[in-house]
Image (cartoon, helix red, strand yellow):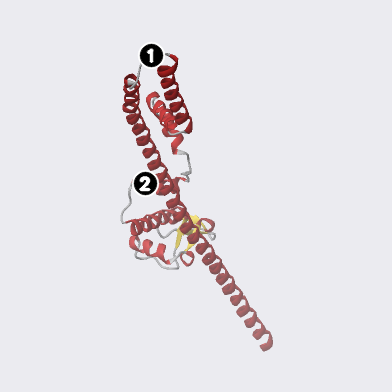
Amino acid sequence: MERKDESTCCVCKKVFSENHLISGYGIRHELEALIKVEHPEWTDECNICSEDLNRFRRVYVQNLVTEERGKIESLEQEVINSIHNSELLAVNPIKTYDEKTSLGDNIADRVAKFGGSWSFIITFFSILLAWILVNTIVLLNRAFDPYPFILMNLILSCIAAIQAPIIMMSQNRQETKDRIRSENDYKVNLKAEIEIRTLHEKVDHLLLDQWSRLMKTQEVQLEMLEDLSKEIKKLKKG
């Protein structure tokens, strides 16, 4: 049995107070079309509870993503779930990725960082110059690597052979980091786009709801004016 301040949700058929119900006049046409798919009997006179309205909003968001992206992929589904659960996506994924790196990965990063710096170039040429001076001037008669510096060439070849794959390992990790950053940026941007659309939808709902309340107020005022007019006519006849 409904009380005066209660009404029935036309979707779930449950009784709610008027504060928890939204009039069909306050729902935008896109959501109304979705509701009519499940409930063809829906009209503007019907009411819907907040829970069912939010459910249709989630379906509406999924349809928006499907129309624009072709199909919902894993990243987009994660964004939709985060909106539903009010979760944040603006996190630092690189920090989590770095925590999983091994000792070898950290060594590769440091070697690549040092190998691409002026410190490496200055140190490298300083060692070469010292090597040449020691074997040509200081130890002229007792040189451990006389000209043409075969031992030095062997060491340089070994360094180049080892340094190249180490730098490639670091570059592969950097590519993975760039991909993770791109995916995170994509998810954040997609969520922002959907949130903005949802915000517009909520603003439209508020405007329509205020308009609906204003119309109801005007209807009550007109009824009061009609009653006053009838009373005045009765007084004049009396």
SS category of the residue bearing label 1: loop
Q: CA distance from mark 2 to mark 1?
A: 64 Å
Location of residue 134 in the rendering, given as x and y in whole percent from the top left corner: 43, 17
Q: Is residue 12 visible?
A: no
Residue type pointed to by label 2: Leu
Q: Farthest residue toward the bottom?
A: 237
On screen, residue 230 above or below 169: below
On screen, residue 171 above or below 103: below
On screen, residue 119 above or below 210: above
- On screen, residue 17 versus residue 143, left or right, reads right
Of 159 and 78, which appears nearest the observer?
Answer: 159
Location of residue 131 in the rendering, given as x and y in whole percent from the top left corner: 42, 20
Location of residue 29 in the rendering, given as x and y in whole percent from the top left corner: 42, 67
Alpha-carbon neighbours of circle 2 within 10 Å: few (<14), some, or many (≥20)? some
SS category of the residue bearing label 2: helix
Question: Of label 2 and label 1, which has the lower sequence position?
Answer: 2
Alpha-carbon neighbours of circle 1 within 10 Å: few (<14), some, or many (≥20)? some
- Residue 143's tag is 1
Of 131 and 182, which appears nearest the observer?
Answer: 131
Displayed quadrant of residue 142: top left
Location of residue 153 in the rendering, given as x and y in whole percent from the top left corner: 33, 23
Of 137 and 172, which appears nearest the observer?
Answer: 137
The residue labelled by disc 2 is 75
Residue type pointed to by label 1: Ala
Q: Is residue 179 visible?
A: yes
Residue at the image point whose x is 48% and y is 33% from the top:
118
